[in-house]
Amino acid sequence: MKKTLFFVGVLVIIVGFLWQVGLRMKDEKVVEEVSLGKDPQNSTYILDNEKITLVNGSFESDSDSKMIVKNFGEPVYGDLNDDGKDDAVLMLTQDSGGSGTFYYVGVALNSEDKGFAGTNLILLGDRISPQNIEIKNGIAIANYAERKEGDPFTTSPSVGVSKYMFVEESSLEEVIGLQKGETVLWGGLVWGGEVRTFIPCGDGNPEYWITGSSTALQEIKSRYETETKDVLPKNYAPLFSVIVGKIVDAPEDGFGADYQQGIEISQVIKTSRSGNCKSDLIVLDTPLVGSEISSPLKIEGRARGTWFFEASFPITLTDWDGRIIAQGIATATDDWMTEKFVPFTANLEFENPQNIGDFSRRGALILQKDNPSGLPEHDDALEVTVYFK
């Protein structure tokens, strides 16, 4: 009897294991077999492990329990996987005949020569009040209002929520686990023997000391050392990052005591050596931030067509004190009359600043948006730290 029970138990475990494997294989198979669509509103997505194909922005199931999925509003476009092509984020509603209306977010990845590949859909909630969706430096954001915990559905949503999502390979992932006081931030990470700081994007933002209480401390160190291994340690090149953290008091002693405030980082969502705070508009591929440069310097990247005027924009190289070392023109290598990303190239010849020391080796490569109007509201520029050999 005991042997029989033992074998039955083993059989149950095996069956359960095979069932889980089968589910995973099913999920993988569904993702792999998603067909490409001509645009985001005519593409295939994954909802609860099942494929749904939108036709002109809507889908209706053939089963007895009717399920209707519709696109809500217009898709928003931007690069979500750092390939220079505009992907799309869209909001959808799902109704099954009951009183509920469920809102989802999906992404359509742009394979320019083939079409759009839809991802899995992420649930926002039932009968929420949607505001908008946006893309910021590779992160999709859905803004909406939901009800307070415990409120009935008859109560209007009143609590503002922002849900952050990112693409991992071909899957849409949600940033989860935000604690009280935490938010998603974009900026530059620096890690070194005497420095571990984070500078958020935006003019005038302070530099924060990364506190020892940060649960992501080892991941920060590992990512930084891996992605900046070609940079001399003393250069302290900023690594563009998207993190989850909160502002706290700076430590009272040690190197961190020199800073006004600290930041406690719990998650590292994304790091990119070629990324920057303006990567929705312009991306520099060569030279990368923190690189050592010499003359002649080849410059390559991509920028929105709106960054150019007459297929070009100005470039300036300065020393650590802001003195101009060289100036030149970047030119588009494709049609620039577009809002899409356009590749560009430039070459600069220069002489190194005299009496270069450890500190004075630092320079700045400035890629300035061409602004024929001269109006200050149309000015923009990307500044990248480089080092003279």
Image (spheres, rainbow, N blue to C red):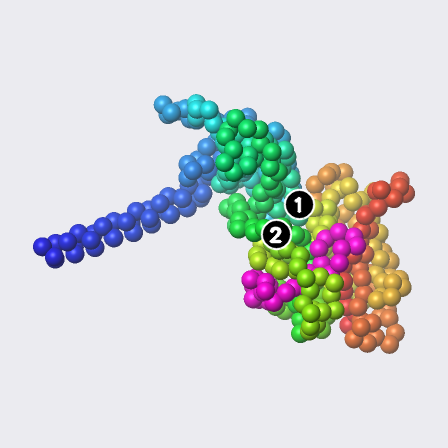
Residues in magenta? Answer: 198-223
Front residue of 280/8: it is 8
Residue 161 within the segment the image draws in magenta: no
Question: 300 left or right of 25?
Answer: right
Asked if residue 311 is positioned above or below residue 156 in the image, the reply reads below
Label 1 crowd bin: few (<14), some (14–19), many (20+), radius 10 Å: some
Question: 357 left or right of 70?
Answer: right
Asked if residue 14 is positioned above or below residue 42 in the image, the reply reads below
- Percent across and percent down for residue 125 are 51, 35
Label number found at residue 136: 1
| Residue found at x 80% / y 62% | 364
Question: 351 left or right of 110?
Answer: right
Regarding residue 82, the answer to whether it shows in the image is no
Question: In the rendered structure, are the residues bearing label 2 and label 1 in contact, judged by CB atoms less than 8 Å apart?
Answer: no
- Percent across and percent down for residue 205 are 76, 55
Regarding residue 121, the answer to whether it shows in the image is yes
Where the C terminus falls, by quadrant? bottom right
Asked if residue 8 is positioned above or below residue 298 in the image, the reply reads above
- Percent across and percent down for residue 151 are 52, 33
Residue 213 within the segment the image draws in magenta: yes
Residue at image mark 2? 182
